[in-house]
């Protein structure tokens, strides 16, 4: 085994700085036009949603005394 040289620890070459618009264009993103664009079926049932909400509420209030 050889001892690493200082060059081995150099940082990676800098990446070009892109604007937000350039980054979004590179991903072919579209602007949000309505709240319906954000809708998603995250929970399979109302019971699963209720369990999540109960857990979240309990966690947020766990250390409050």
Image (tube, rainbow, N blue to C red):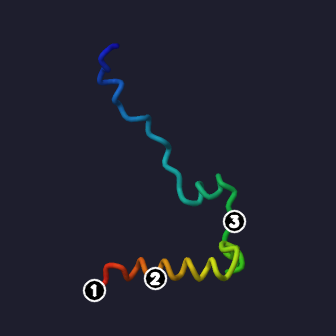
**Secondary structure category for the residue under label 3:** loop
In this view, the residue farthest toward the top is 1
> Going from the N terminus, do you reach mark 2 or mark 3 first?
3
Report the mark closest to the observer, 1 or 3.
Answer: 1
Q: CA–CA distance between discs 1 and 2?
A: 14 Å
| Residue topped by disc 2 | 57
> Going from the N terminus, do you reach mark 1 or mark 3 first?
3
> In this orientation, which residue lies closer to the viewer: 61 or 35?
61
> CB of mark 1 within 8 Å of CB of mark 2?
no
Q: Which mark is residue 65?
A: 1
> In this orientation, which residue lies closer to the viewer: 65 or 7?
65
Position of 11 with respect to 28 (left or right) is: left
> Going from the N terminus, do you reach mark 1 or mark 2 first?
2
Q: Which mark is residue 48?
A: none
Q: CA–CA distance between discs 1 and 3?
A: 45 Å
Report the residue at 40% width, 79% height from top: 60
How packed is label 3: few (under 14 Cα within 10 Å), some, or many (20 or more)?
few
Q: Residue 33: x percent and y percent?
A: 70, 77
Q: CA–CA distance between discs 2 and 3?
A: 34 Å
Position of 28 with respect to 50 (left or right) is: right
Report the residue at 67% width, 82% height from top: 46
> In this orientation, which residue lies closer to the viewer: 2 or 57?
57
Q: Which mark is residue 30?
A: 3
Q: Residue 28: x percent and y percent?
A: 69, 57
- The image quadrant that residue 40 belongs to is bottom right
**Secondary structure category for the residue under label 1:** loop
Report the residue at 34% width, 24% height from top: 7
């Amino acid at each position: 085994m050889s001892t690493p040289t200082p060059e081995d620890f150099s940082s990676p070459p800098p990446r070009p700085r892109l604007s937000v618009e350039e980054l979004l264009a590179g991903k072919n993103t579209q602007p949000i036009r309505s709240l319906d664009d954000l809708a998603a079926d995250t929970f399979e049932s109302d019971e699963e949603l209720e369990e999540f909400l109960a857990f979240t509420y309990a966690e947020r209030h766990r250390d409050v005394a």
